[in-house]
Image: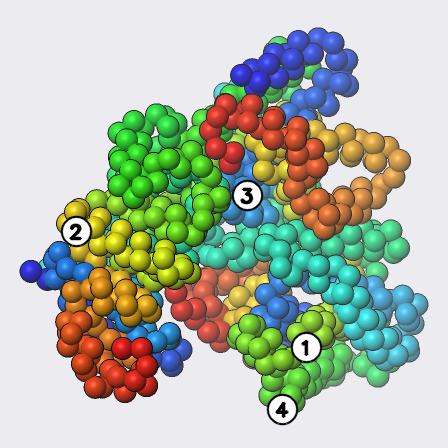
Amino acid sequence: MDLGFLLLQLLTGLAYASTLFLLSVGLSLIFGAMGIVNFAHGSFYMLGAYLLYAFTRGQAEAFWQGLLWVMAAGLVIGTLVERVLIRPIYRRPEEYQILLTYAILLLLEDLVRFLFGAGYRSFPFPPAFSSPLLLLGTAFPSYYVFLLGLAAAFAFLLWAFLHRTRLGTWVRAATQDREMLEALGINVPLLYTAIFGLGIAMAAIGGAALLPLQAATPGMAVDAVINAFIVVVIGGLGSVWGALLGAVLIGLLQAFGILLFPEMAMAFPFALMVLVLLLRPWGLLGRPPAVRT
Amino acid sequence: MRLALLFLLLLVLGPALGEYGLKLASEALILGLYAMAFNLLFHQAGLLSFGQAAFFGVGAYAMALLVSRAGWPFLATLPAALLASALAALVIGFLSIRLSRIYFTMLTLAFAQLLYAVAHKWYAFTGGDNGITDLRPSGLLGESLPFYYLTLGVFALVVGFLAGLARSPFGYALRGLRDNRARAESTGIDGFRHLLLAFVVSGAISGLAGALQGALQRSVFPDYLFWTRSAEAIISTILGGSGTFLGPAVGGAVFLFLRVLVQAKTEYWPFFLGLLLLLMVLFFPRGLGGIFTEAGRRWSTGVWGGAARG
Amino acid sequence: MELLEVRDVYKSFQGFMALASVSLSVAQGSFHALVGPNGAGKTTLFNVVTGRVSPDRGQVRFHGRDITGWPTPRVARLGIAISFQRAQPFVSMTVLEAVTLARLGYERKTLVWGRSLARHREAVERAEAALAKVGLEAYATSPVAQLPLGDLKRLDVAMALVAEPKLLLLDEPLAGLSRVERRKMVAFIGNLLRQEGITLLFTEHDTEAVLALADRITVLHQGRVLAEGSPEEIRQNLEVRQAFLGGSI
C-alpha cells in the first residue's frame, strides 16, 4: 500500500468529513440551544442537494450561483418551518417534538421522491475544480480542496459569530441556560428562529456541497441524520469544535474502514458512538451533567 | 369482561370474512400486537423507541431462517422468534436505556438501521435484497382461516398478558418511573432493571408479530427492519391513542384500513403518513381515544375492570 | 450514637464549588435542621446523602457503614427515606396505589407480575396503615393528581413511612404552605416522627418552624458549614446573624 493511496483515502475521508461537519453543526446548535431534536435535519441536507440540482438544472457552470441560492433557500425554509411547525410545540413534552420532526422527515422524503423521482441525481464537478490534482503521484479530485476550504471557512465564521458577536453570545448562553435568556430580556423566539434557520441553512449547504461527490437519493435523509447524530454525540452537544472533531473522526473512520473491512465499515462509526456513550456520554468536547440520571 | 366479548366477536367473525378479509384481519391483529408492544414502552415506561423494527425484523428472520433452512414447523418457530427478539432487545436495551430520553430514541433508531444494513448486505445469511421467500406454514396453518384463528389466539394471549402486567406491581413501577423517576428510585425501585425488562418484553412481542407477519406474507425482506416499519407502530399508537389500553390496536386497524385505501389511489403513501402524523401531533395528540373521550373512557375502564387507567 | 455522619464532603459542578469541607452528624432520634440561603448547598448535600450525586471527596456513613456513592435504590433500602421539595409523586395513580407501590419498592417486589397490585394484601394493609398515620385514609381512592399541596406532602411522608425508615430526609416540607398550614404541618411532623422513633434531617427557610422543630441546627453558607449547634446557640451566633444581614434569625 503506497503513500499516495493512503493520502487519497485520507483526503477522501476529510472531504466527506467537511460535509458531515456542515450537516452536524446545525443539529448540535439546534439541539444544544433549543433543546429540540430535529429528526428532519438530514432531510434538509437532502433537500439542499436536490435544490442545487434543481437550481442549476444539472449544469456545472451554475454551481456557484446554485450554492448561493441553496443557502438563501435554506434560511428561508428553516425560518418558515420553525415559525409554522416547531414553535407551537416548544412547551410540549419531548416525545411530541420528536414525533413532529419525524413526520417532517416522512413528508420531505416523499416530497422529494414526488418531485425528482426515486432514482439517483448526480452532478459533475464545477469547472473550476474539474481537473484532478496530483500529489505524491496520486490523482485526487481538486474539489476536495474546495470542500475542506468550505468547512474550514464555516468553522471559523461560526466560531467568530459565536464568540465575537452579541447575537452569538446569546446563542452560546442558550446552550447553557435557557431560562436565563428570558430573564435578560432577550427576544427568545426570534433568537430561536435565527438559530434554527442558520442550522438548516448549513445542513442544506452541506448537502449541496456533497452533490458532486455523491449522488442524491430520497433515502439519504435518514442515514444523514443518524450520522449527524453520531457526530454530535461523539463531539459533544452544542460544541462547534466538537462537531468538527466528530466529523473528522467519522470521515476518517469511514474512509479507512472501507479499506480494511468493507462489509463491516458501516458499523464502525456506530461502534465508536456506542463507546463514547458508554465511557463519556456527554461527548469528547462536551460538558458533563450535574445530577446522575 | 368486555375484552372477552370482543374476542368472541372476532372469533365468530372469522368464517364470515372472505379470503382477502381474513388476510386483512390477520394483518390488523398483527399490527395491533406490534403497536401494543410499542405502547408498553411509550405509555407505561415513558420510553420513545424508534427502533422497534429491529425486533420485528429479528423475529421475522428467525422464523424465516428456521422454516426455510432448518425445516422447522411453523408453530415451533414462534417461541424461537420470541427468544431471538428478546435477546436482541436485551443487548440493545442494555446499551440504550442508560441514556436520557433523546439519546435513547436516537440510539434505538441507529441500531435498527444497522440491523437493516446487515440484513441487506449479508447475502449469504439473509438473502440480502431478495429476502427469504416461499415461506408456507405447514399443514392447516397454510390456510387463511386457521391462520386467522392462530393470530387471534396469540393476540388474545398477549393482550391478556399485557393487561395483567399493567395491573401488577411491575406495571405500577413502570408508571411510577415514568411519572417521577427520582421519586420512584428513592422508594427502592431500580429504574434501569425495570426499564430493561419492559424493553425486552416489548421486543419479544414485536418479534412475535414479525414472525406472524412473515408467515402471512409468505416472505421476509430487509424492509422488515427498515425505519418506516418502526414508524408504523408509532403512528398506529398515536392514531389510536396511547392513553387507552387497546388504543394502539385500534389505531393499527385504522392505519391499515387507511393504507389500503390510499395505496389504491396513489403511490405516495409515506407522504400521506407524514401528513397524518403531523396533524395528529399538532392537533390530536391523544389520538382517536382522545377524540372520542367519553367513549374512550368508558371503554378503557371497562377493559381495565377497575384498575388505574394507565 | 450518630445515625448519619457526613465527613468532609466536597462537591463541585463544572468549576462551581457546591460543597466544601462539609461535615455533619445526626444523632439517632433527633431532629436536625439544615438551613441556609438558596444556593448554599442544602439540596446538593441531600443528593449526596441519598446517592443522586457522588461527592468528589469525603464520606457518608450511615449506622457506621460507609455508603458514599451508593446508588439511590440501595440507599433507600438501608432505611433512608426522602421526601422531595416538589412533592409530585405518581400523578397517574390513586393515593393508595402510590403508597402500596412505595411499599413494594422497598420490599423489592416490583419485578413480579404474577398478581395484581391490589392482591398484595400485606403491602396494601401497610399502605393503609401509613395513610391512617398521616391522616389521609379518607383519600385512599382519590387520584394523586387531585390532592392539594398540603395533602401531597402528607402523601409523600406516608410513602416514606411505609419503607420503615430510620432516617427521614425532608427537603423544604413547608414550602408553598400558608401560615396556618405550616403550623399544622410542624405539629404533624413533630408528633408523628417522635411517635415512630424516626430521626429527621430537614431543610427549611421558615425560621420559626426550624426553631420550633429542631434539636440541632447546621447552617450552610456558600457550600461551607458556617455554624452548628442547638437552636439557642445558633440564635445567638453573631456570625450567623451577619451572614443573614441581621434579618431572619
Choose mark 1 or mark 3, whichever is in front.
Answer: 1
Whether residue A28 is visible: no
**Pointer 2 and pointer 1: residues touching (CB < 8 Å)?**
no
Which amino acid does the dot numbered 2 rest on? Answer: Arg
Please state the horizontal and vertical placement of residue A239, each as a whole percent of the image: 56, 76
* Residue found 39% across the figure and 65% down from its top: A291
Which amino acid does the dot numbered 4 rest on? Answer: Arg
Q: CA distance from mark 1 to mark 3?
A: 35 Å
Q: CA distance from mark 2 to mark 3?
A: 43 Å
Up-down: is C73 above or below B131?
A: below
Mark 4, residue position:
A164
Mark sitting on residue B42: 3
Q: Nearer the viewer, residue A247 or B298?
A: B298
**Snapshot quadrant of residue A217:** bottom right
Quarter of the rendering occupied by the C terminus of chain C: bottom left
Choose mark 2 or mark 3, whichever is in front.
Answer: 2
Q: Nearer the viewer, residue C38 or B231?
A: C38
